[in-house]
Amino acid sequence: MKLSRRSFLSGSSAGALALLANPRLSAARGLVTEPTLDDLVKRALAAATKAGASYADIRVMRIRREGLSTREERVEQVSATEEYGVGVRVIAGGAWGFAATPNVTAAEAERVARDAVAIAKANAPLMKRPVALAPAPAHVDVWQTALTKDPFKIPLEDKAELLLAINREAMKVPGVSFATSQYAAIAEWKLLASTDGAYIEQEVVRLWPSYAVTAVDDKRGGFETREHDLPPRQAGWEYVEAAPLVADARRIGEEAVEKLKAPSVAPGRRDLILEPSNLYLTIHESIGHSTELDRALGYEANAAGTSFATPDKRGKLRIAAPFLTFFADKTTPGGLATCGYDDDGVATQKWNLVENGLFVGYQTTREQAGWIGEAESRGTSYGDSYGSIAFQRMPNVSLAPGPKPRSLEELVASTEDGIAISGRGSWSIDHQRFNFQFGGQAFWEIKHGKKVRMLRDVAYQANTIEFWNSCDAIGGPASWQLHGTLSDGKGEPGQINSVSHGCPPARFKQVNILNTNRRNA
Amino acid sequence: MQTPTEARRLLDRITTLVRATKGAEALVSIRSSREGNTRFAVSEISSSADVDRLAISLTVQIGQRAATASTNQQDDRSIDGLVASALRMARLAPDNPEGMPLLGRQSYAPAKNPADLATAKLTPDARAKAIGAALAAVEAGKVVIAGFLSHGNHSLALETTAGLSAYHAWTSCNFSCTARTIDGTGSGWAGQGSNRMADLDTAALARVAVDKATSSARAGKLDPGRYTVVLEPAAVASLLGYLTGAFDARRADEGRSFFSKKRPGDKLFPETISVRTDPSDPALTSPPFDSEGFPLATTRWIDKGTLTGLPYSRFWARKQGKPATGRFGGGRGGSVGWVLDGGSASPGELIKGVSRGVLITRFWYLRPVDPSTILVTGLTRDGTFLIENGAITRPVNNFRFNESPVQMLAHCDGLGSTSIPSGYEVGALRVPALRTHEFNLASISEAV
């Protein structure tokens, strides 16, 4: 059922005109299924204002999840989850307050609005400066994931058969002992309205088929696992259909077996080629998190930490080699963090964080823009459920490709002695984003321009600024790939964010390689 | 939070609907909570919330086929939809040869006052007051403080069509804070969890964090290497969580675990090391049954340094001819309360026995590196000090470590009294501070 917004907008001819004039809205399918929500939204915002809120917004959110997990020849778990609820966020007395309920009725929405104001008032005496929001245009719009096949409408049997086919192929490889595969799809629908005039409906669909193959050495003991590198994506089922999951299963199995038999790496300094399936997470941890403004100013000090990229270093600190530019972009097609508007109702955008190696920009929300003298928010506010307070979360943060048409193979061919790494392994970085240590899924030794053999027990450890300044070559536009994660954590209570990172393969000179083998210790 | 009567009414409605389908069996769980939290940073409140939550989960089994559907909506239409969805998916799901029959009636050890009325009724005003007390501990102009106070009133109810009925209600609360010196050269942390808000002295914890921040300021350089370390409870809990997460018989039997080459009776650690799961400890806030309703008993997995056994799921126990122990919730505390027994040493005594070593307050960003040895990497944070000749002599830089909780316990020669540290990356474990040797502080972290 399509919702009429006329009731919400009645009395506002300018709003109604904007509604008609907006090309995206006129083309939209209309996603709201509960026409009573108009009334609920209006009443909750009115209740907050009446109770003393100087600003209020309401998010009605429905999250649907579907999951399958298998091992070898059997399906272990089939699940479908639905979560629905309403949260009201207010500013009263200069402090934030938030309350939420799964009972999506007008009376409950009014109740949580009043509770949110009471919470804000309880906290107001402990505020040193009142919360102030940067101005933002009042958008009325609908936005949704561009997809051709709704993954929730694909029969369960098809999904189970795909996963079991992957396992069958992988298990054909001699030496493979176990194969596990999973499928997850998440549809996140949300209606956001605020006393500043925002009225925005969005639905984001994300999915991720994944698998891992394990080889066990029964004689000597020990085991190695190789995961497929396919990233999660904002997309429809067509993404799964186009992915070479079954086609790759034997190779993934063979690499698990080869990894188990591979020589343990010799520690020391080596040139390193990181494929996009590995480099994306290094970007996430060292560039993405360090340029979150709340972190840089101490708002995450008790949890996710602070950052080396403090405001006094903006425009001065050379984070990376001069040919490297990192950009934030909540509009990247297929990006996990891509959407039309953030949870402050600000239109999403693209901007540079590191320009030609120089630290230049932050991720901000309406609350934060003024903290560094910026007039407008960058649009990065997000709350991961109806019951979660929206706060600054990472947009897609990507490394721009080099101008030359250089491939991964060419990077390898021009490397005399090094290691190439693909896939996500163990990862860890300190609470100010200096010292990191990353593993991977597959490691190859490079000698005289060729990948000669696999290695095992590899991790690379470096300091963010030294590492990015040691980069001497990156791939061109055709080598750029979008990878990402569904489980970026931040905040207290902890919230999850989905975010993509695009990058070309890149080479780093003389990076510290560790051997992680303690099996004989 | 649902009362037993409210939960029972909903559970009965769902199981009755499932029974209407021939051959269908059901396991239903209802989790409900009211949670409150307040966050502060830069010495003022940054966010605060009261949130009601509900999770109704229905697993339908039809022969060897099974599927699970969940919702947080309890109106009739949603419940009808939940049942229809679970039934439809279960019919479509392929056979799972490992499916086990649902459990019937069970008896559970009575919980010892897990729910605390005062904690259940905590208001936003009381939260603001508790945080005001923490902020008052800060001397203006020297440090800034950030932290988090959360509390919850929870219930979990289970029912099966085979006659199982379980209900557990509890409260929880956690407070942690990080103080940083204004010049950014010192940082300190303190945090604690319980099921009773009366146990948490926010002002005292804030004073610990402030003291650590000021005494860790302008740290000097210490080279990486293998050191004797005194680990405070938060550091012990976060690293130990990777060992408790490895306790699983099936992975061991399949050859993909640290425990694959170990057998019950193997002596892994010194006599002083005993590790158990303890659902009877109310402050650990874990229910006395697992997700299938299987009763969880207090079990000693490491007794005086010796491995006594590993947990078996019902399927794996049947296959291997062993008694089942219930399904555990994985690492970092999981759904079961883990305890590392303490000793008699005071913090001062642990330090006194060190000729040259490092005192570590807590760890950060721990990640598994090699599951076959439970090698974990991570970093020290918020209070790292050099110990020389039995006394703390100066603050030192932070380190990245590469070490296994197995080695932490194997080299342990001193244990303090236990507590439940709580904070980011610290699961609900009851652990002591401990002294251990040859701890691999692998590289320097510039982070403060």
Image (cartoon, rainbow, N blue to C red):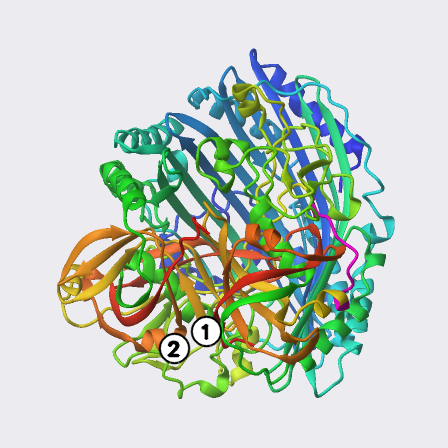
Residue B335, label in figure = none
Check disc 2: other Cα within 10 Å, few if <14, some if 14-19, many if 20+: many
Q: Name the amino acid type tagged 2.
A: Ile
| Residue sitting at the far top | B22
Quarter of the rendering containing residue B248 = top right
| Front residue of this view, candidates B165 and A510 | A510
Residue at coordinates 60% horizontally, 27% vertically from top-left? B80
> Is B350 located above or below residue B315 in the figure?
below
The part of the chain drawn in magenta is B337-348
Report if residue B343 lies within the magenta region: yes
Residue A149: give x, y in percent of width and height: 32, 40
Labels 2 and 1 touching (C-beta < 8 A)? yes
Question: Which quadrant holds residue B384?
Answer: bottom right
Q: Quadrant of the N terminus of chain B?
A: top right
On the image, the x and y values in percent for residue B259 come to 52, 39
Q: Which tag, 2 or 1, sits closer to the chain's start?
A: 1
Q: Which element is circle 2 on?
A: helix
* Chain to which mark 1 belongs: A
- Which x, y percent locates residue A362? 45, 76
Residue at 31 percent across and 49 percent down: it is: A229
> Which kind of residue does numbered mark 1 sit on?
Phe
**Mark 1 secondary-structure assignment:** loop
Q: Which residue is labeled 2 in the image?
A: A465
Name the residue beneath numbered marker 1. Answer: A434
